[in-house]
Amino acid sequence: MKVPFSVPRQLWFVLFGIVLLPAIVWVAMNSGPLAPIKVTVTQVAKGEVAPSLFGIGTIEARRAYLIGPTTAGRVSRVLADVGDMVKAGQLLAEMDPVDLDKRVTALAASVARGRSAIAAAMAQVNDARSRLDLAGGEARRYVDLGKRNFVSQSVVDSKLQQQQSATAQLAAAESAHDSARQDLGRLEAELDGTRQQRAVVRLQAPVHGMVTSRDAEPGSTVVAGQAVLKLMDPASLWIRTRLDQSRAAGLQAGIPAEITLRSKPRERFMGMVARVEPVSDSVTEERIAAVAFDNAPSGLSSGEMAEVTLRLPAVRDVLVIPNAALRRQGAVSGVWMRDAGRLRFVAVATGAHGLDGTLQVMDGLKAGDEIIVYSMRDLNSDSRIEVVSSLQGGPQ
């Protein structure tokens, strides 16, 4: 009886491996780690970049005032509260005047006495001047009589001595008058200074504005310069915003701005850069700009956050690439370029950035160069790539 031919089991495994190996290689080369990296590409072309700057800032008052005494004292009363609108010159608070009222009264009485003393001294001056006029006239007459030998020389000398005495009395009266005027000036200065001290304890609003803080209550003791109330001018509210230094070329006063308030996220308000601070933040590498509203909305509050977008002048007829194409190799920024079927990393110098994702290329590329925009994985110069129209799944 014949035994049917049978294939050894080992041979079956060998045949199966020979058939399976190409499939494994095909899968590895097309869908596994050895598969080409799917990428999207674009060509460098000339175009326009509308550069914009985006920053987050805080609403602040351009003009804010700290209302407090110039000398230490106790708060007597506070007449305004947070949120009150006040007018220039309005009494907001008052410090305890201690003895200032009594000092003002006493000095006012002294000034009145000083004026009476001046009047008395002036009367003495007038009297002394009259006596001098009389003595001078008699002296001249007796000198003339002496020359004619109608009176003796001793009588003439007596009249001359009376004239000299009247002159001295006039000088003394005028000196007393001057002294009285100086005393009055000193008393008036003291009175004026005391009245100013009395006025200082009355804390008045320097401008029309709104009370933003009440920092002391009646009975509290404050030192010189310490604020009892804080006041701001609501019309002076603006946004102090921070902007990336590397993208701040062309930033200057007058540039239009679009403002979004955190309290009104769906509304847009227009404004412009009112001032660019001359000092930047060296730690965060940011420039600081103040943006004013064209028409400030109602209900603004100091300290609220706001988003600011600045529209810089457009840059036209320049090389443009998508911002997504930019990569970093160490400290170098550049793009992956496909050149003769191979990948090459090219360092580029960039210029203006647009919020629409465009980027100006200043050096490193030329029009027509083909660059990688997105890739499924990180690239290197030996990477195999497959160009597709779009990526699905996490592009890099």
Image: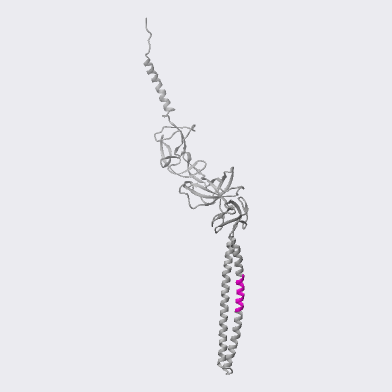
Residue 188 picture location, percent across and down? 58, 68
Range shown magenta: 112-124
Tell me: 101 left or right of 386: right
Picture quarter with the N terminus? top left
Q: How many marks?
A: 0
Residue drawn at point x = 51 percent, y = 47 percent: 242
Q: Is residue 243 above or below residue 96?
A: above
Q: Is residue 234 visible?
A: no
Toward which corner of the image does residue 149 lie, by quadrant? bottom right
Extreme-top residue of the structure: 1
Q: Nearer the viewer, residue 200 or 331?
A: 200
> What x and y, as percent, mark residue 96?
59, 58
Residue in the image at 56% along x and 83% along y: 167
The location of residue 383, given as percent across then percent down, is 41, 33
Q: Magenta stretch: residue 118 in it?
A: yes
* Res 338 quadrant in image: top left
Instruction: Pick out the residue farthest to the bottom.
Output: 149
Q: Quadrant of residue 197?
A: bottom right
Q: Position of residue 106 (x, y in %)?
A: 60, 67
- Residue 116's place in the image compared with 365, above or below, is below
Residue 36 is left or right of residue 198, and the answer is left
